[in-house]
């Protein structure tokens, strides 16, 4: 009887190993309870949407000491699921609470914004939202479609209840609940070319 080939066992990275590797990595990876998952590259429209919303948020929060905006390179640590994730945009209230005193990973996002891509939209709406909801500080989740005018806004009502609002009229605006900001969809989608991304 021929010997059965043994598949190599996947390597389990500790959070410390992941963080050390991520500091020198050429590309970013998320961490999911021991597994490192390389992130896909962004599109031009993805970048435009993140830039547009970051500018609006930055201006709105410039004179408000109670909130701070982070983008792209700052991770969120989710202790319940042992994950490090990279939100496109996040806002915190008060001072950042850091993971293990590191300045590249926080544990207290108030608002998280994700720009949806075809490869990640199910994950962003499903498991990722479930992960974020386990953070006590997390109150509002904004999902922006990069292929059409559509913003999904989830707002925490109670520990077990979230309200969802869909906005898909380019002449309409979304209004954040956790802090004062009203922004028109046409400003979020400024210079976005839906044909370009097909």
Image: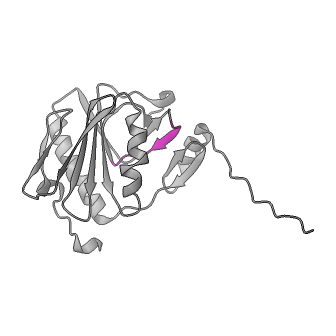
The coloring applied to the image is one colour
Residue 16 at x, y = what percent?
59, 37
Left or right for 155, reference 117 = left
Q: Residue at x 18, y 32 (%)?
A: 179
Work out which residue is located at the far right of the displayed protein and give it: 1
Q: Quadrant of residue 3?
A: bottom right
Give the magenta part as a residue range: 81-88
Q: Split into 4 quadrants, where in the image is the C terminus?
A: bottom left
**Residue found at x 20% / y 41%:** 58
Rendered location of residue 111, percent (x, y): 29, 38
The answer to whether residue 104 shows anywhere in this view is no
Residue 5 % position (x, y) = 82, 64
In the image, farthest residue toward the left: 171
Which corner quadrant of the image does residue 148 belong to? bottom left
Which one is in front, 117 or 92? 117
Q: Nearer the viewer, residue 99 or 85?
A: 85
Q: Is residue 87 magenta?
A: yes
Give the dominant element type of the magenta stretch: helix, strand or loop. loop
Residue 47, compared with residue 111, is above or below; it is below
How many numbered discs, if any? 0
How far from the left and from the top, in percent, is residue 1? 93, 68
In reply to whether residue 86 is colored magenta, the answer given is yes
Q: Give the residue at x 38% y 36%.
A: 133
């Amino acid at each position: 009887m021929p010997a059965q080939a043994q598949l190599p066992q996947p390597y389990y990275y500790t959070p410390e190993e992941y963080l050390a590797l991520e500091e020198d990595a050429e590309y970013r990876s998320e961490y999911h309870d021991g597994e490192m998952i390389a992130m896909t590259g962004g599109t031009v429209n993805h970048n435009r949407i993140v830039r547009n919303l970051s500018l609006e948020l930055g201006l709105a929060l410039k004179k408000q000491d109670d909130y701070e905006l982070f983008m792209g390179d700052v991770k969120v640590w989710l202790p319940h699921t042992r994950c490090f994730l990279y939100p496109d945009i996040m806002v915190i209230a008060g001072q950042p609470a850091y993971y293990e005193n590191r300045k590249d990973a926080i544990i207290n996002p108030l608002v998280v914004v994700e720009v949806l891509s075809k490869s990640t939209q199910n994950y962003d709406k499903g498991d990722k939202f479930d992960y974020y909801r386990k953070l006590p500080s997390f109150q509002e989740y904004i999902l922006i479609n990069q292929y059409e005018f559509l913003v999904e806004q989830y707002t925490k009502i109670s520990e077990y209840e979230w309200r969802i609002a869909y906005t898909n009229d380019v002449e309409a605006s979304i209004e954040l609940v956790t802090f004062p900001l009203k922004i028109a969809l046409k400003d979020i989608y400024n210079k976005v070319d839906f044909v370009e991304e097909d």
